[in-house]
Image (spheres, rainbow, N blue to C red):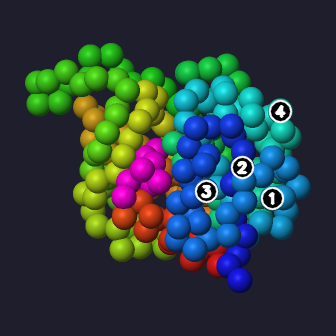
């Protein structure tokens, strides 16, 4: 029987698509609104889209903040998607509610007048873009078999600014090098949406499922 993966109910729009992607690769995924479910979970996924305050409000109102921190400290796999990755940090310029503080740093709005090759770029950064993995991430089991410069799907107006640059697992280019993934022990976050990124995105969920098992 596959190991159980708890998907935290952040009341975000990608909650259903994340759980369905996990099920598609054979995971036993259960959406939960009960923090106690994290105690016996072999893996946890923290999804999120939209505003960081809305996701943190859902986390705090259901009593998930401390259990998520304790889960991360236990060394079990924690995968955080899009705004789920952003709330790992101390806080965001997007709102006023502090983040989980599992990673030092802040989430900042893209600077105005972003340009690439003389052309002005729109914010939000929306659509397919290539991802370049760090040497550490390229050898990590979550990203095993994912080629450099693979395309993944992004939707975000804010970008993560980790204080410890060694936690940056991948970058993407959007007027500047933007943090596309973070990695610290068993805590992993992707700014892009694997569940919207075709076969390679499903491969990441499959790798996570194997890691949990």
Q: Is residue 109 left or right of residue 212?
A: left
Marks 1 and 2 close (CB-CB < 8 Å): yes
- Local SS, label 3: helix
Nearest the eye: 104 or 63:
63
Camera-side mark, 2 or 3: 3
Q: Residues within 10 Å of mark 4 (few under 14, many from 20)?
A: few
Identify residue for label 2: 8
What span is in magenta? 191-198
What residue did someone put label 1 on?
A: 38
Q: How many marks?
A: 4
Query: CA separation, marks 2 and 3?
Result: 10 Å
Q: Looking at the picture, how far across and down is residue 177, in whole percent?
A: 31, 40
Q: Which residue is mark 4?
A: 61
The quarter of the rendered structure image containing the N terminus is bottom right
Examine the rendered structure and indicate whether residue 177 appears above or below residue 122. below
Vertical position of residue 66 compared to residue 206: above or below: above
- Residue name at image x 84 percent, y 58 percent: 37
Mark 3, Cα crowd under 10 Å, few <14 / some 14-19 / many 20+, is many
Select label 1 or label 3 by which is in front.
Answer: 3
Left or right: 24 as drawn, with respect to 77: left
Q: Quadrant of residue 78?
A: bottom right
Q: Earlier in the sequence, mark 4 or mark 3?
A: 3
Q: Secondary structure at mark 1?
A: helix
Q: Are marks 1 and 4 in contact (CB under 8 Å)?
A: no
Residue identifier under label 3: 19
Q: Which comes before the other along the chain, label 1 or label 3? A: 3
Q: CA distance from mark 1 to mark 2?
A: 9 Å
């Amino acid at each position: 029987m596959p190991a159980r993966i708890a998907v935290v109910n952040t009341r975000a729009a990608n909650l259903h698509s994340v759980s369905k992607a996990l099920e598609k690769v054979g995971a036993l995924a259960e959406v939960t609104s009960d923090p106690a479910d994290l105690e016996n979970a072999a893996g946890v996924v923290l999804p999120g889209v939209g505003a960081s305050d809305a996701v943190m409000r859902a986390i705090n109102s259901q009593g998930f903040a401390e259990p998520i921190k304790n889960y991360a400290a236990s060394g079990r796999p924690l995968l955080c998607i899009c705004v789920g990755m952003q709330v790992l940090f101390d806080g965001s310029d997007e709102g006023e509610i502090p983040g989980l503080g599992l990673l030092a740093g802040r989430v900042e709005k893209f600077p105005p007048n972003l340009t690439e090759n003389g052309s002005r770029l729109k914010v939000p950064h929306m659509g397919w873009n290539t991802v370049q993995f760090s040497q550490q991430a390229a050898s990590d089991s979550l990203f095993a078999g994912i080629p450099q410069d693979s395309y993944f799907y992004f939707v975000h107006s804010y970008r993560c600014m980790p204080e410890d640059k060694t936690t940056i697992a991948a970058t993407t280019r959007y007027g500047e090098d933007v943090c596309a993934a973070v990695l610290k022990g068993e805590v992993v976050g992707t700014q892009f949406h694997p569940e919207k990124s075709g076969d390679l995105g499903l491969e990441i969920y499959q790798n996570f499922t194997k890691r949990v098992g």
